[in-house]
Image (cartoon, rainbow, N blue to C red):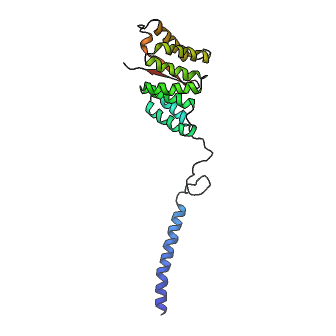
Amino acid sequence: MASSGTSRAAPNRTLFLAIAALAAMAACGPEPIAGADGGPFPPGIDPKGRAVDGIEVGHRLMSAGQYELAMDAFTRAALDHGMTPEILTSLGSANLGLGRLGQAEKMLRRAVSEAPDWAEAWNNLGVVLMEKGETGEAQQVFRKAYALDNGESDSIRDNLRFALAKTENPDNNVANTNDYKLVRRGSSDYLIRKTP
């Protein structure tokens, strides 16, 4: 019986030595990557972190000429902020970039009715009216935008100049270049060019 007890101990001892050898090899390997709390898991989302605002994403897409994607970004931003005059103006500008003049005009008219002192919204409405061929009303709208802006924006001044030139001489080729500029809050503006 002594021999059978010895034979049972030998496989257990071999198994123990194999486990000990694997543990020693694992200890020699590279250190595990630690998370922010020192644990082995990657860090989670920082609840204090600032996400990029959908309005800013939309403006960047507008600057890149990606009007459809900008429209999606502004629509998502409306879920967070509501239909503010800024979002209405942004949606109207994106619609203009896509050639949807009726929808652009509707959004921009709503924006200027909710924020009647906002020069950028009036300017963008003027651009839509020029694109629709409603030069007389566009000229009045640009004058209002220029007055509200106190003449500080080069884009609004240039749009008014184009509208005045078009009104004085409808066949003027300089005014027919359609280099009207859409503007937004801040220093950025967008140039919408009508493709021939």
Asked whether the viewer can see residue 103, the reply is yes
Q: Residue furthest top?
A: 169
Residue 35 in the image, given as x and y percentages of width and height: 58, 53
Q: Residue at x 49, y 88 (%)?
A: 5
Is 18 or 130 nearer to us in this picture?
Answer: 130
In this rendering, the answer to whether 174 lies above or below 63 is above
Q: Quadrant of the C terminus?
A: top left
Residue 158 in the image, given as x and y percentages of width and height: 52, 14
Residue 16 in the image, given as x and y percentages of width and height: 51, 75
Total marks drawn? Answer: 0
In this rendering, the answer to whether 36 lies above or below 18 is above
Q: Residue at x 48, y 26 (%)?
A: 106
Q: Residue furthest left?
A: 196
Is 49 or 99 nearer to us in this picture?
Answer: 99
Residue 82 in the image, given as x and y percentages of width and height: 56, 36
Asked whether the viewer can see residue 66, the reply is no
Is 133 or 10 nearer to us in this picture?
Answer: 133
Q: Residue at x 57, y 32 (%)?
A: 84
